[in-house]
Image: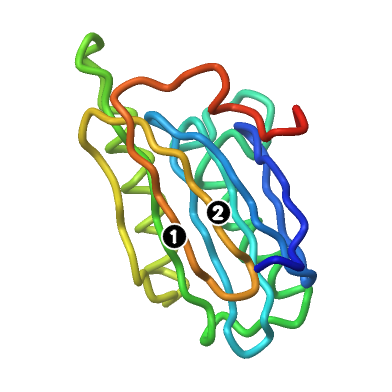
Amino acid sequence: MHNSEKYFLHPGQIFVSEKPYIIQTVLGSCVSVCLWDKSERCGGINHFIFSRYNNRARNCKYGDISTRYLIKLLKEMGSDQRHMKAHIIGGGRNSELDCTIGNENVSIAEEILNENKIEIVTKDVGGATGRKVVFHNKTGEILVYKGISIRESDWYSDDGK
C-alpha cells in the first residue's frame, strides 16, 4: 500500500483506476459501493446521497445511476463482472430525523449488485454512527472507522484535498 496514491471522494462522485490508490470518504446516510476485480487488479468506489433518480438532473448523487455507472467504468477498463466483488458501506440513520434514506440507499446498492450477479463480500450498514472508509482499489482491502459524530477534519485528507 505504500506505493499507492491517495484520493478523497466527495458525495456524488465516482473514482476508478487501474493504478493503486487509497480512496477515502466519509458517510452518514450516504452509501459507498467499493468494487474491485481481483484478476484485473482494478477497482473503484462511489458515494451516493439518494437512492433513485427522481426527474432531477441525472447524476451520480443517485445510487441507481452511480452504481450502474461504477460497474460500467470497470468493464470499460477490461473487468469482467463475474470477477467483481463488492463492499457496501454506510446507510446510517440520524436519530433526530425520522428518515429512511439510509435504508433506501443500502437497498438500491444491493438490488443493482444482485441484478448484475456481483458478490457482496462485506456489508457495514445502518446504525446511528458515521463511517470513514479507506479502500484500496487494487486489493479490495477496506477499513471502516465508526464514530458517533463526524468532525470537520474527517472530511479532508492531510493535504486538504
Q: CA distance from mark 2 to mark 1?
A: 7 Å
Q: Residue at the spot x=63%, y=34% of the render? A: 12
**What amino acid is found at the position of numbered circle 2 in the picture?**
Thr
Q: Which mark is residue 67?
A: 2
Which residue occupies the foreground of this view, 70 or 53? 70
Q: Residue at x 33, y 28 (%)?
A: 101
User: Which residue was labeled with disc 1?
Assistant: 112
Q: Which of the two residues, 90 or 50, is positioned nearer the viewer here?
A: 90
Q: Residue at x 62, y 85 (%)?
A: 80
Location of residue 128 by image quarter: top left
Q: Earlier in the sequence, mark 2 or mark 1?
A: 2
Quadrant of the rendered structure where residue 27 is? top left
Q: How many marks are shown on the rendered structure?
A: 2
Q: Residues within 10 Å of mark 1 (few under 14, many from 20)?
A: some
Please state if 80 lies on the left or on the right of 150 as rendered. right
In the image, what residue occupies the spot 51% across and 43% down? 63
Residue 66 position within the rendered picture, expressed as x and y whole percent measured from the top left: 60, 47
For badge 1, the amino acid type reads: Ile
Outermost top residue: 96
Figure check: 105 above or below 113: above
Residue 26 placement, left or right of 4: left
| Discs 2, 1 touching: Cβ within 8 Å | yes
Residue 52 position within the rendered picture, expressed as x and y whole percent measured from the top left: 47, 37
Is residue 51 placed above or below 42 in the rendered structure?
above
SS of the residue at dot 1? Answer: helix
Location of residue 76 (image quadrant): bottom right
- Residues 107 and 9: in front is 9
Element carrying mark 2: helix
Vertical placement of 89 versus 51: above or below? below
Q: Quadrant of the N terminus?
A: bottom right
In the displayed structure, 132 sits above or below 16; it is above
